[in-house]
Image: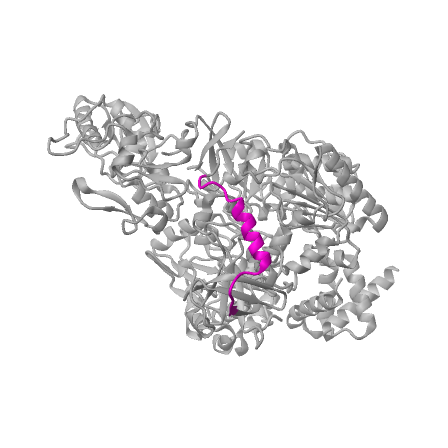
Amino acid sequence: MYAIDHHDLGTPPADSAKLVNVEIDGQSIAVPDGTSVMRAAALAGVSVPKLCATDSLKAFGSCRLCLVEIEGRKGYPASCTTLVAEGMKIRTESEKLHALRKGVVELYVSEHPLECEGCPAENHCELQDMAAVHGVTGSPYLASDRRPPPVTHAAAAVEFETDGSNPYFNFNPELCIVCSRCVRACDETQGTLALTVQGRGLASQIAASQAERFLDSECVSCGACVEACPTAALSEKTLLAAPQPNRAITTTCAYCGVGCSLKAEVSGGEISRMVPARDGHANQGHACVKGRFAYGYATHPDRIKKPMIRAKISEPWREVTWDEAIGHAAREFKRIQAKYGRDAVGGITSSRCTNEETFLVQKLVRAAFGTNNVDTCARVCHSPTGYGLKSTLGESAGTQAFTSVMKSDVVLLIGASPTEAHPVFASQLKRRLRQGAKLIVIDPRVIPLVRGPHIEAAAHLQLRPGTNVAVITAMAHVVVTDGLVREDFVRERCEAESFEQWRAFVADKRNSPEATESITGVPAQTLRAAARMYATAGNGAIYYGLGVTEHSQGSTMVLGIANLAMATGNVGREGVGVNPLRGQNNVQGSCDMGSFPHELPGYRHVADAAVRGTFEADWGVTLREEPGLRIPNMFEAALDGSFRGLYVQGEDIAQSDPNTQHVVDALSSLECLVVQDIFMNETAKFAHVLLPGSSFLEKDGTFTNAERRISRVRKVIEPLAGLADWEVTVKLSNALGYPMHYAHPSEIMDEIARLTPTFTGVSYEKIDRLGSIQWPCNDAAPDGTPTMHIGEFVRGKGKFYITQYVPTRERTGQRFPLLLTTGRILTQYNVGAQTRRTSNTAWHSEDRLEIHPHDAEGRGIVDGDWVGIVSRAGETVLRALVTERMQPGVVYTTFHFPESGANVVTTENSDWATNCPEYKVTAVQVTKVDKPLDWQERYRQSREARQPAHRPAPTTA
Amino acid sequence: MDADNLVHMVNDIADFFVPSAGAQRAPAEVAAHVKRFWEPRMRRQIIEVWRTGKAPLSEAARAAVALLAQEAAAKG
């Protein structure tokens, strides 16, 4: 069942500028060439009956309901598969057509229950609609030797076993009309191909994988099939528990950096379900198991609903009023600044909060605290992207829209696993690969895109962790020495001096694939072939993730990526570019909003007096010209006693930052830690003030996704604790003596637009009108900028940088012979604060250590054994997963559960330019042990005691 | 601030700039980077560490910190 306010046009739009004139039931209309008759009719306001067609899927022509008459043509063609032609005259209604369609509907209902009361799709069931339109109340086709259909849906669920294994949706085969929309959605929308039609004729039925339960099958629970289903055969369980929705509010997903546009369907005070917006610019009608289904955390019993304070972290919490909590926090910050100086405090903004909220937190730190000690969680993920792309291209952002990938010929995917971490983009990528584009994967692990159903990468450069820079420089060596540089592009678009210096550097034999093979582990010929493939692609696009940035040479690698793109002319048009896949929903936005300690909003350095002057005039304060502390520096300063107070909004630094013991020691030494979060997270254990946060469903604002797309977040329910996050920051600032006056987040965006050149054209009114806006949005680009650097780089001429490979200090040896690297899994998200509190635990209830059979066998480890992982920073215990996805010598884990302690073992090694931690390379030893450590067991027991019901709780306003 | 960590950090910055800027120009690039991204107390401390003469700073890193020290002294 698609969104309740969706007006379906039957078939997808045609991509043609040429218009064709047709007449439908006497109405004239011009539509793009290639449009189906069904869609043309819908655009003319004429609804042609249909069951197997929907505008998110290619026309299929199986249900035979959409028959029409076309002047001059024989018979009754299906309008979904018949394309318009100039001058075509179409009739959609006649007695004959009605009789034909009625017969078809009677055949369908012969296999479908007729009593609709209580059906989750009632009033939204397309078969019900078709029966009503054609006056069908029964079927003459019930043969005496065949069993009549069950009279009610409940009877059908009993008689034909309903598959309720998936935590979020049911499959009731008896309600299925085998229209194949689910099968096609799994293919065309999601790209997993987990569903099929099994059997023939009347015995045909939909099956997941090899007729397995949905939960056990290859199904990734994206829900595309559920949405495509015209009946209630596939339907959300929440529709059984909650009232039928009667209102839809469009908002933006709060999980990964794809930033899917979602519709929250509401009835009364409850959210009935979440449906992707078909006109969503980032997701184009698709969503994943997290965005569509895993929103139940918003009303989880663990939500903090009352402000709390305590004098010492050893004392119990005391619930207080908002005013008391805010007043206490403000007094403490002022006391600390009076005693230790104004730079003894700082703040951390969140990539999970809105642009408006991060803008306010950095404003509070700079204007109310009077310091530049503000940072954001992008410090520990994509800060090298900001440094590298600003240095080479001139802007700290990706260059393309996601749709650009549909024009790529070769995709170079580095240190990212989109099917796991950016699933909706992955679906688009797979669609393009199945059209014939080639994929090169650079990753230590055999990620799912290396080889999967109907997907196989043309090359997999399975490098050793920590050797990215050697690989990218070797690829550049091949481009230069094989004469594959796009000389015309470089001559026109790039700095000659830096290019010539770079050309000489990469051409050096020490950077050749043969010379670096022993370092990287990548066979020279494989690397050469991959470099040639990318350079000669036509359109070569680079997509990368944290496997690039979270290294001691993270920034160098980003520079190397930009070098390669510029040298091959792969920047400045559709189908190419350099595209960081951002981990969290608003990483791009939080960076744009001036969350880094050295930059004001719009990536302008605090030392720039003219820029500072603009903000000073608007904010009425004097701003500091020196950069502030970055997150790792804050920890160091806390340990040396020069940093005593911290305001953290929506971040769990105790769990997400490296070397947990180091972080714990730092947080424990603070005199005032204020945590603003929706849950009592790990960081809150060291806090003195706890301010309840609000989920994305409880506030207005905007998120900016990985393609610079600013989308609206709209309030669906009231804040559970009474205040949205931006209102809390305003109150705190007021209490600190720096009054803020905003009645609505739109006014904060107006201020951002006023002060930020790349945002001058942005307003809520314009976002509402256009749906979303990709910045820069200003007088030069009033509707935004899908593709950057067209004709000229933002910095003028592109600049090349020397990317000398420098081995990380984190080396393997006798004590720690293996390298640990980390990543995410599809059903969980980062530190798991949200997804652990949903039924997504059905797929992933614990983090495991992935280890190659060779390494496992040598240690006597078999699948499922407890294994101890020890590094120079700490020790933890996980269960082993023995798999050939890993290469020998490298182990891997996810970090979604606090009891896993992945960051207990990671070290504080960091990127040379930005201090981004080197999560991806930790030298460890792995040994078989009997059980988890005591602290882990306590965590596990505590969590299991709070385990949510299998189904997400209805969200109550 | 952990002195060893600061030394590592400035050495890493020098490792990046030496190959591109060369031994002569690298110290100025390193100093500029540190000035652009390091909070003042970090800069003060690396200067203190440098003054001891015992820190394992690379040649370029040492020269860069010397430049930072000169600038700080000039500012008073």
Magenta region includes residue A943:
yes
The colour mode here is one colour
Query: With A313 as the anchor, is A193 left or right in this view?
Result: left
Left or right: where A797 falls relative to A119:
right
Q: Nearer the viewer, residue A435 or A418?
A: A418
Quarter of the rendering occupied by the C terminus of chain A: top right
> Where does residue A24 sit, x and y in percent of width and height?
27, 26
A928 to the left or right of A43: right
Residue A85: in sight, yes or no?
A: no
In this orientation, which residue lies closer to the viewer: A319 or A557? A319
Residue with the most extreme left position: A145
- Image position of B33 with respect to A339: above or below: below
Q: Write down the quadrant of residue A762 in the picture.
A: top right
Q: Left or right: A504 with respect to B62?
A: left
Q: Residue A63's x, y, as percent?
A: 22, 35
Q: Which residue is the extreme one toward the right?
A: B76
Give above or below for A518 relative to A104. below
Q: Magenta residues?
A: A927-951
The quarter holding residue A189 reads top left
Near-viewer residue (A480 or A129): A129
Is any part of residue A623 visible from this angle?
Answer: yes
Q: Is residue A882 covered in magenta?
A: no
Residue in view at x 43 percent, y 67 percent: A862
Q: Position of residue B28 (x, y in %)?
A: 74, 67
Q: Position of residue A760 (x, y in %)?
A: 63, 39
